[in-house]
Amino acid sequence: MDYDVLVVGGGTAGMESALTLGDMGYSVVLAEKEPTIGGKMILLSKVFPTLDCASCIATPKMASTFHHPQVTTMVCTEVGNIGKTPRGTFQAQLNRKATYINFDQCTGCQKCEQACTVAVPDQFNFDMVARRAVYIPFAQAVPKKAVVERHGTSPCSQACPAGVKAHGYVSLIRSGMFDEAQELILEAVPFPGTLGRVCYAPCERACTRGELEGALPIRKLKRFAADRYYQKHPQPKPGSAEKKHQERVAVVGSGPAGLTAAYHLARLGYPVTVFEAQEKPGGMLRLIPPFRLPPKVLERDIANVTARGVEIRTGERVEDPAELRKKGFQAVFVASGTPRDKQPEIEGVDLKGVTGAVQFLRLAASGTKPSLAGKTVLVAGGGRYVIALDCARTARRLGAKRVVVQFRRSREEMSSVEWAITDAVEEGVTIQFLKAPARLVGADGKLARVESLDVQPGKRDVSGRTLPGVPGGTTGSMEADLAIMAVDQEADPGKGREDLRITISKTLAVDARTLETCLPGVFAGGDVVSGPSSVVEAIGTGTRAAECIHRFLRGKQRIPEEVGLNLPAVDKQTVLGRQDQYTPAPPGGRSKLLVEERRGGFNEVELGFDEKTARENAARCIDCGGCCECHQCISACPADAIDFGMRDENQTLEVGSVVVSTGFDLFDPVGKVQYGYGRFPNVITAMQMDRLLSPTRPYNTVLRPGDGKMPDNIAYILCTGSRDCQVDNPLCSRVCCMYTIKQAQLLMGALPLADVTIYFIDVRAFGKGFEEFYQQSKAMGVEFVKGKVGRVEPADDGNLTLHYEDIAGGGKLAQTEHDLVVLSVGLLPNQDALALFAGGELASDAHHYVKEVDEDHSPARTSIEGVYVAGSAAAAMDIPDTILHSGAAAALAAAHVEKVKR
Amino acid sequence: MDDRLRDPREVMREEMLMRDLVLATLREGPRTVPEIAEAMGSPVHEVMYWVMAARKYGFIEDVKEPEDDYFQYALVEKK
């Protein structure tokens, strides 16, 4: 056996059972699902009828339990699937939830909590105030350690191929921490300004808010962070000049993949040299027109790379990457992209006046922009939709009088680039869908006319993607001065790459796991391997390549783990289910230059956010994953205790006996619609009032949640959710009368001028000292009204009118106004206990509490021999009864352990 | 008609946006929760969440004696 006894639940009953058994010398494992033991008692103000301080009683008991040499306390631990072994012991499966905090290092200083940017309701204050996603439950928590609430990776962050923590920077922007947002993005990529403009934003497609009124503008929020930071910091902060490693790394190509790999390798401490054949670095990014990506933004992004000490040699074409190894580079990363146009196999492509998209955009980006004044231009858009539209829009800006784009697909099939289609149409570009050039007709060797075919809508492939249609029979013709073929691109084969393996698609072949080519030490990635892809995918490959090369150079296991520390994406429906309702919050802010402002110039079309708009948009985030991974806690923690690499651990234990002490649930008064809970802010539960009266209260004193007023006329409604067949709970909860009287007495102390009225059916003061306690409250001035409250309605100034049957007054209907209404909610069974055992063997009573099979002679004995129930898992009971019951359960468990051991 | 209050989770999420507005209001001097709400143009019961969170995390504090049953809150002086 691993332990003599497993105690499930660390509230009053669980602690008492564990301590009793521990004191008898038995080894005990106490499993608690919350991050602290203490149950509900530690959250109370005082106990009845003695009015002793609940914290003063519970805290020493919590500490004794946690530090008891015979008791092992496991918090954040869920128990399930308990089964009996043939020899009478039990096997239990424990799921120890990752806390993402190293408890040995955490000092409980709460600096992580102060730094956290995600606010969620504090369940230990019954939602009356917020806590943070990283939190210590309360001041007296045992253990007093922080935990991170992390449900999974947020879908936006999970969707980013470059590993950018989208949720993190959105949360930082929401908090007004703009520099920190940019710095978080820079942890993953050197191109925030570029991605903030040209990324296809898979994060937005994954955004859960998209299931409501529309996704967050995550890409534009990234742009906002970058633009603001670049305005403030025209030049990057210089990186550390210290190079931790001596091995030199060469990168061939300065596109997004190459520069990202160089950036991360330089951050890891390697001297890196980038070779670029063109005159300026940036690769295909240089060809994105200025109206979408201003060159100064790209320059500033590239400066993030050079600031890390990366040397970029432009105008140096590398024919044979393997040669670089011989020149002293210990590793080479080939990221030379797909810089060549792939011309379609149609008649007339060799005519003068026919060009490729890359060639056209390169010319347009050069110092000698061609004039297309008065010309007619046809753009054939194959698979490169956005590039085709870039060509068309550029042609319009260069003076073309008519620009026609032909796509082989329907507009519906191109919804991912609807924004670009809209922009182009606004700028006067004609777009023909389901059409393709069939023949380019020349005159005197120069393009004169384009003949086209209608295309039939295509079929879908196995992934559901529509295949390009098959040309049909209808022909059309248009005169044209220039035809731009934006059909496809391919890698430059180079002259010295014979040693590298080339695929049938003319891309480089690599090991998909390590990105290594057939030549040791020569790696490749980005478009030269995958074929034309998106900027963000190329950046992601660059990040992965840096990790692979680092492992190669350090002699580590060559296959890297997944980049980043992502958990599985959190389920969107689960996220949406956290709230009953969502207030619509559509995205706002003017987004584009007016059409007339765009004419004749290359000014950027899309506009950025101002601070207010950015923060308001960011505030629409619903924090899917809980923790947003903004990493502020990591920066703030002086003990280096945060560990996002931590994962849940499953453990199977064999124990001699089990004590079930899973406690009770409280009735949710939302079900009693007539009392207005959840509709009127000044209707609260008695548990919430206990928090307001406690020394660790959420407010500075007892205040109305509706407006912060000190109440002076408080009403209690007894038996809310107990003795009530309408809510299927006919039982008396045994404690409500007394805790209400306790609170009334405490309120008279806290608010000496306040009136307290208790509406009751009958007061049950059955325990030792209870009747005296009741009479004492009457003597103090607490008013008791025998009458059932029918409904609560709002009155002026946040007050509430109670409509009730005045039984003592002859049964007439009456009404009274109060400024705060407290619902004395009943106790309900915690039915989680019944699911602990494999096969559902643990029997319940008629009211769904754990059944005591011999309540009169052997309380705490359950339907399973060796399993005992302690405290309010068996029935509603007060604290003294819970202590007694737990002693009985402990004694029976000890007896069973002795029997099993024999 | 659905007359439920906004879900506390939704209101609390906005704290990080609203905190600066609460603090900006208090730069003009101590205010009660209804006064802060009026200045912000937000429902007073929602402002209560943001004010109490700002108090919990040490940005503001209550001014000692309440007037007309309402406490005033003031910025915490940064040392």
Image: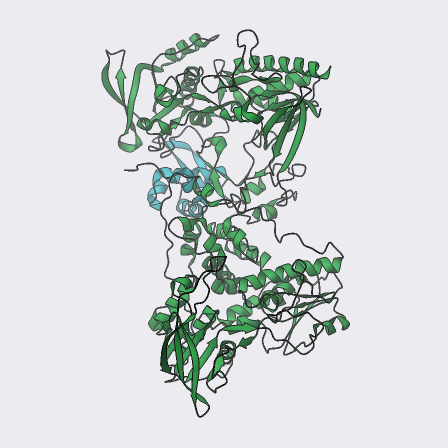
Chain colours: A green, B cyan
Vertical side of A814 occupied by A309: above or below: below
Q: Nearer the viewer, residue A386 or A455?
A: A455
Residue A286 % position (x, y): 53, 73
Extreme residue toward the bottom, this view: A444
The residue positioned 62% from the left and 15% from the top of the image is: A890
**Where residue A665 sits in the image (x, y, percent)?**
47, 25
Q: Is residue A706 left or right of residue A463?
A: left
Q: Is there any visible trace of residue B32 in the rendered image?
A: no
Place residue A265 in its image quadrant. bottom right
* A4 with respect to A756 (left or right): right
* Nearer the observer, A318 or B15: A318
Question: Does residue A99 sit above or below A439 in this rendering?
Answer: above
Task: Between residue A857 and residue A347, name the one nearer to us.
Answer: A347
Residue occupying the point 33% across, 45% down: B41
Taking the image as shown, residue A347 lies to the left or right of residue A38, namely left
Q: Quadrant of the N terminus of chain A?
A: top right
Percent across and percent down for residue A132 are 51, 40
